[in-house]
Image: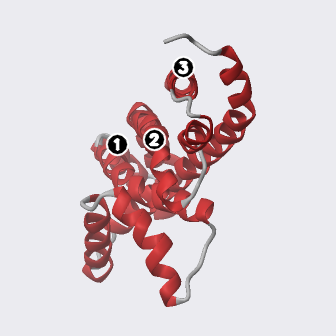
Amino acid sequence: MKWDWNAVSDFMPDFWDGLLVTLQVLALGSLLSFTLGLVWTLLMRTPSRWVRWPVGVVTEFVRNTPLLVQLFFLFYVLPEWGLTFSALATGVFAIGLHYSTYTMQVYRAGIEAVPAGQWEAATALNLPRRRTWTAVILPQAIRRVVPALGNYVISMLKDTPMLMVITVLEMLGHARLFSQQHFQFTEPLTVIGVAFILISYLASLLLRALERRLVR
């Protein structure tokens, strides 16, 4: 099969639109998953079982159901209950919520890896509980979990094509639409394949640089 550079040229405007959406979903979804994951972790460490039990049920349910099912539910079922959001907002929320249940476990492991002496030192200094968390425990825990969090960023990137099912045209969505309209599949699919590899590689380099900076 002959490679058609004209097809690549014709596809590029759609590719840039899809790339922008993909990066937007990745950035916002990552931010949401990191924030929610930390919230879930802290709530699970509260003394009250009336807080821990519902948080545990919700996070276990989300973690053990497919992201695809969650996308369909949020986009097609919630509007029947009067909750309607744009397709892009729904996709960002679904990815962020889904992966927050995994980053929650990463934060938990990081917090448990902080030496007991750090807790004891904070208690000896009579630091308030909030100050202990923000100034002593969390900075050390987060340094330890950056590589694991970075892995989930890559996983989120690879899951962005699922948003096609709720009409979000990210890179694969644009490639699929272009292919159906022009009956040319090789060029657009190759372009987005290379794009995913490059984005993943650049993200891994940035995360490695961040890790080195935090270790200093």
Marks 3/1 in contact by CB < 8 Å: the verdict is no
Which residue matches tag 1?
110
Task: Please say whether residue 195 is visible from this viewpoint.
Answer: yes
User: Residue at image x 51%, y 61%?
Assistant: 166
Q: How far across and down, in percent of the image, does residue 98 sit?
A: 39, 57
Earlier sequence position, callout 3 versus callout 1:
1
The residue positioned 37% from the left and 58% from the top of the image is 68
Identify the image's colour scheme: rainbow, by chain, secondary structure or one colour. secondary structure
Q: Which of marks 3 and 2 is nearer the N terminus?
A: 2
- The residue labelled by disc 2 is 142
Local packing at callout 1 (Cα closer than 10 Å; few below 14, some 14-19, many 20+) is many
Residue placed farthest to the bottom in the image?
81
**Horizontal arrangement in the rendering, residue 53 relative to residue 132 (left or right):** left
Q: Name the residue under label 3.
A: 205
Residue farthest along the top direction in this orientation: 2
Q: Single out the mark in the foreground, 3 or 1.
A: 3
As drawn, 215 above or below 53: above
**Tag 1: amino acid:** Gly
